[in-house]
Image (cartoon, rainbow, N blue to C red):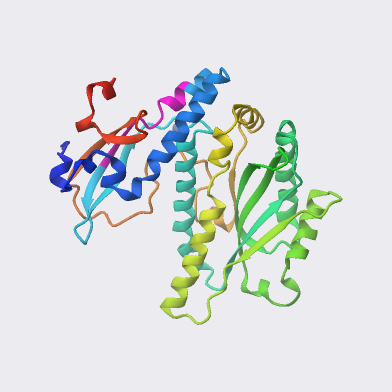
Amino acid sequence: MLRIPNLADVLPSSDQDFLYLSNVSPKDKPWDKHRSESDLVSKSYRFLEYDSYAQRIENCSRYLEFVLRPDVHGQVKFKLNHAFFCRVRFCPVCQWRRSLKWRARILEAVPKLLASYPSHRFIFLTLTVQNCPLEELRANVTHINKSWGRLVKRSKFPAVGWLKSLEVTRGRDGNAHPHLHVMLMVKASYFKGTNYLSQKRWSELWKSCLRVDYQPVVDIRLVKPKSGSSENSVTVYMSGVKKAIVEVVKYSVKEADLTDDPLWLKGLTNQLHKTRSVAVGGVFKDYMSSKEPEDLVHTDLEEDETLDEIAKAYFAWVQKVKRYKSINFLTEEETT
Ligand SMILES: [Zn+2]
């Protein structure tokens, strides 16, 4: 049954704060920021005469439907239930939702992976190449992906499962800086003796797969293997893994790089058309979907949903104030 509640009844508030999503549900604060950025990207596409992208982004997530449930502490929890997403590659809202989806997928997979491979560990790599002119980005991305294909086939490649994500930033020299963020699952024996790949050895290995004559920059982040198996050490290990995962699937392009310069956006749009930003391989494929996320609504980890839905709440994007506002309180001007 559909009930539109008076939010003031559900969430008592001393002032008018309950009008806005960011006030009634602090965890949904990022909506305002990302949707504002989408407005800017839409404007840039309009300027570039990419009208179809501009229009689609303008219509992206203009209305949000949430279901409200009390949690075990009696706090009302908001959960997105319905929204229209434009799915334009560089729509900031859609890019954010895709990254949340990948994060949820991998976070769901990790405990299952550790149950099946209890002695395995995760390591996190950043593999870079030299910056390239924006107009050569597509060729460079193809080259990076081919080189990655060579890397996973090498006998020294230590991972039984992996997830990689392509990020393109704008270098200080004005060139494009494509690089890979990678999460690897390795055997415990990786850390012993000759199996271990130091930063220098990773750089050599990546260099030979890239078939280049310069030394590529490689960064490795190890989440310290847990010592002992107390509940606390597992929790500490997992929180380190989670933090690193967030970095791996954060975004494919920084929002500032989408909004600062329409010509940069144009170059990215043309160069990265129909390329993939995230890929999964090895045993990870058995534990998570490797497809591009379709459902951008349900991006939370599965929660205990035994508690009843108490209401639905609807919010509309109000461009002028750059906030999502409860539709019960829209002014006449805001509804048009
Ligand atoms: Zn969108």
Relative to 156, residue 213 above or below: above
Relative to 133, residue 303 above or below: below
Left or right for 212, reference 7 = right
Between 281 and 196, the one lying in front of the other is 196
Q: Quadrant of the N terminus?
A: top left
Q: Is residue 62 magenta?
A: yes
Relative to 227, residue 247 above or below: above
Left or right for 14, reference 212 = left
Q: Is residue 115 magenta?
A: no
Q: Give the extent of the magenta segment.
A: 55-66
Image coordinates of residue 259 in percent, x first then y, are 54, 33
For the point 18% across and 51% down, the residue is 308
Q: Quadrant of the C terminus?
A: top left
Image coordinates of residue 279 in percent, x first then y, are 59, 47
Left or right for 301, reference 226 = left
Between 158 and 87, the one lying in front of the other is 87
The answer to whether one can see residue 115 in this image is: no
For the point 81% across and 55% down, the residue is 215
Residue 31 lies in what quarter of the image?
A: top left
The answer to whether one can see residue 151 in this image is: yes
The quadrant of the rendered image in which ligand 1 is seen is top left
- View extreme (front): residue: 15
Image coordinates of residue 39 in percent, x first then y, are 45, 29
